[in-house]
Image (tube, rainbow, N blue to C red):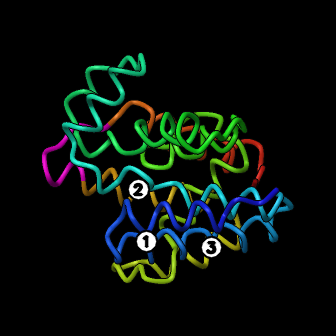
Amino acid sequence: MNRDNEFKEILKNRLTEKRYIHSLNVADSAKKLARLYGYDEEIAYTAGLIHDCCKDTPAGLQLSYMLENGVELSEYELGVAKLYHSICGSVFVKKEFGIDNQDIINAVRYHTTGRKNMSLLEKIIFIADFISDERDYNGVEIMREKAVKSLDEAIVEGLSFTIKDLIDQGRIIHPDTLDAYNDAMMKILNTGDNK
């Protein structure tokens, strides 16, 4: 049974209007990418819809929730509150939404950092977050073009932007982000696998 309408009602109360609209747009982008790359459109839509469920929760509450639920954070994660929402969200969707699909849980968990060997759904949500309709950053059109050509090329493009930005800001780069970049580059250079 599809529970997206139930999730929408919950998200309306948990998120700012801007974040809620973003969530709807990511869900729409995820559904389009799922259709293009042969993944279940309903599952992709749901994952996109709920990916930012904890984004507007204060960092201290996110941290408390994760610790109460036995989440062990790495030194990189503990020191970067911006990463909390995806980790917290992966616990929240399982515990509060009753999601038992591990692929959805992982897509929520890794939509910010990425990681090596992402599943097709993880890649779809990662990219959908970059290309959703309200996004207007410099280079978004290139990302949208790459997303329909190759998910791995889009991942490399998105992570190149992210890594450069983090370096320019003098911030920590999570090892999963570097692994995701290298993994996608290896697939492009060595195997030609575009999914």
Amino acid type of the residue tagged 3 in the rendering: Ser
On screen, residue 125 versus residue 134, left or right, reads right
Disc 2 to disc 1, C-alpha distance: 27 Å
- Magenta residue check for 167: yes
- Residue range of the region highlighted in magenta in the rendering: 166-173
Q: Which mark is residue 160?
A: 2
- Residue occupied by mark 1: 20
Q: Residue at x 72, y 42 (%)?
A: 190
What secondary structure is marked by label 1? helix
Judging depth in this view, the residue of 148 and 5 nearest the camera is 5
Residue 52 coordinates in the image, percent (x, y)? 44, 56
Amino acid type of the residue tagged 2 in the rendering: Ser
Q: Residue at x 41, y 16 (%)?
A: 70
Examine the image and state in which quarter residue 118 appears.
top right
Q: Residues within 10 Å of mark 2 (few under 14, many from 20)?
A: some
Residue 154 coordinates in the image, percent (x, y)? 57, 62
